[in-house]
Amino acid sequence: MTDVDRLIFPPVYPSSAKQPTVLVAPLNWGLGHATRCIPIIQALERMNAKVVLASDGSALQLLKAEFPRLPAFHLPSYHIRYATHSMVWNIARQLPRILYAIRAEQWATERLVRSQGINGIISDNRYGCFSRHINSVILTHQIRLRVPNAALQWAANQMLRFALRKFDAVWSPDTSEPPGLSGELSHPPVEGLGIKYLGILSRFTSQKSKKTKMPGKVAVVLSGPEPQRSYLEQILLEQAMTMPFHFVFVKGKTQAKTHHFIAENVEVVSFLTSRELCELLESCSFVVCRSGYSSLMDLAALGNQKALLIPTPGQTEQEYLADRLHRAGVFLMQKQHEVDLASALEQLPTTSGIASETFDQQTFEPILREWLATISR
């Protein structure tokens, strides 16, 4: 270690083997990456691990709200925006900034490893959040990217493999048996990546409450990158105010909690805790949301939920997942520029939803316990 390294990365004594310290760092791309880390953080605490949180923006705010007692640190932001309907163009024009953020994230991670005595890292889709000195795991359901061009798709997936191999293991939040919930995105496994399947991860439990669903009550859960999140909010609000249903909009904005009515039948809340959101969804006959993978895992955990999925324009992963489940009759899908709430609410009763207990929510615990034993040695 050079003199400069000693100044930047001051040495610390390692954490006690009896209580390993784990850094959990989800990507701030909507709230889904943060929400699916919640059951992992809860399990780590039950297993006597010390947990350190790190992220940025809304994801970090959500984790602080859910776990106010845990130390939380800010990581460099990717600042990803979906200004157009072309995923390739959206990412290409922001790639230099993203690559710089990943490099800065790696430096910040190494500083945290030394200053906090970290023994292991669980990174949710943050490709710079690893350390060459300790065991680092990446959590992702995408081991195969979908790009609307064969040559670009091959190149993108080669880059993804390179990024994933920097980690000691890849954990996929899905079943090992295909097609699972993610379909071709994570099946079959890719050789050499050390993939382990955790089962679905949701902040909601499969124990359904006795709360009766209210006919005509609709939950609209907004999420994802701007400006598309705001575009969808405006489209849905304009239609909801003219309909004979009671709508509850959850904006997914964690900066400050607000609650108000903008029409007699439309109430808007900026943010709900996991418990509050679970209670809301269980009381609603229908749900309207993006088709992000974490949202789908939450719907699967609730069980038998009727939902309209609206993929974020340009996110081919969400388009694939929504189309796959729409074709199977599980959920209904509409494109953002074709949203018709009246038509959707007429068709939703014919969908099946995901049956309760289709997916196991405890599969990840033995894998996590084994990993903790490894990093504690």
Image: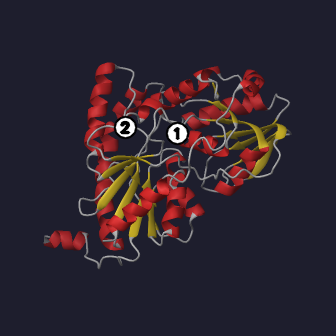
Q: Of residues 329 and 359, which is closer to you in this image?
A: 359
At 42% across and 33% down in the image, what residue appears?
185
Q: Earlier in the sequence, mark 1 or mark 2?
A: 2
Q: Could you say whether the residue bearing mark 1 is in a helix, strand or loop?
A: helix
Give the residue displayed 62% in from the left and 46% down from the top: 301
126 to the left or right of 319 = left
Location of residue 184 (image quadrant): top left
**Residue 351, image quadrant:** top right
Q: Image quadrant for the N terminus?
A: bottom left
Disc 1 versus disc 2: distance between alpha carbons? 13 Å
Q: Which residue is mark 1?
A: 293
Where residue 352 sits in the image (x, y, percent)?
A: 69, 30
Q: Which residue is mark 2?
A: 143
Disc 1 marks which amino acid? Tyr
Q: Residues within 10 Å of mark 1 (few under 14, many from 20)?
A: many
Q: Residues within 10 Å of mark 2 (few under 14, many from 20)?
A: many
Task: Identify whether 165 is placed above or below 321.
Answer: below
In the picture, measured across the screen, residue 34 lies left or right of residue 192, that is right
82 relative to 359, above or below = above
- Res 225 seen here: no
User: What residue is drawn where x is 44% and y is 25%?
Assistant: 86
- Comparing 287 with 84, the one in front is 287
Residue drawn at x 23%, y 59% is 132
